Image (cartoon, helix red, strand yellow):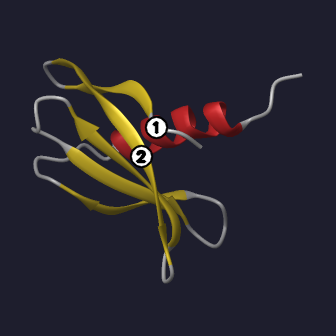
Amino acid sequence: MEVFETYLTGTDGSIEGLVNTINTADEGRQYQFSSFDDSLTITIAKDEHGHWKRISSTEPYLSGWVDELGEQIDQRNTPTY
């Protein structure tokens, strides 16, 4: 997957940024969202059951961001016919 621009829903509005893919030996494929204003970085990956989990993030952190970002990544990775 290539880098793509997206947003997450914050308490005061949308937070725009870029998502990059990170491949690691211990955690496998991870995805990192970095906001354009450097206020938020969140890294997520799928667990052994295929559920999205947070690897790391800046604070403050909203738990809904894991699912929101995971859904966006899944949509981009789903082939269209």
Q: Estimate how packed mark 1 is, as few (under 14), some (14 to 19) or many (20 or more) residues with alpha carbons within 10 Å.
A: few
The residue sitting at the right extreme is: 81
In this rendering, the answer to whether 11 lies above or below 66 is above
From the image, which quarter does the C terminus lie in? Answer: top right
Mark 2, residue position:
20
Classed neighbour count for the residue bearing mark 2: other residues with Cα under 10 Å, few (<14), some (14–19), many (≥20): some
Q: On the rendered image, what quadrant is the N terminus found in?
A: top right
Q: Residue at x 53, y 32 (%)?
A: 72
The extreme bottom residue here reads: 26
Q: Is residue 36 left or right of residue 9?
A: left
Image side of residue 53 versus residue 7, left or right? right
Disc 1, SS: loop
Residue for point 11% across, 38% down: 38
Judged left or right of residue 50, residue 38 is: left
Q: Is residue 69 above or below residue 30?
A: above
In the shown orientation, is residue 8 left or right of residue 44?
left
Give the percent coordinates (x, y) of residue 19. Answer: 40, 40
The quarter of the picture where residue 46 lies is: bottom right
Amino acid type for the residue under numbered disc 1? Val
Residue position for label 1: 3
Vertical order, 39 against 61 (above or below)? above
- The picture places residue 79, in percent across and down from the top left corner, at 80, 32
Amino acid type, label 2: Asn
Count of residue discs: 2
- Seen at 40% across and 26% down, the residue is 5
- Per the image, label 2 sits on a secondary structure element best described as strand
N-terminal label among 2 and 1? 1
Disc number placed over residue 44 in the picture, else none: none
Name which quarter of the figure residue 53 lies in: bottom left
* Tag 2 and tag 1, C-beta contact below 8 Å: yes
Instruction: Please identify the residue farthest to the top as the structure is shown.
Output: 13
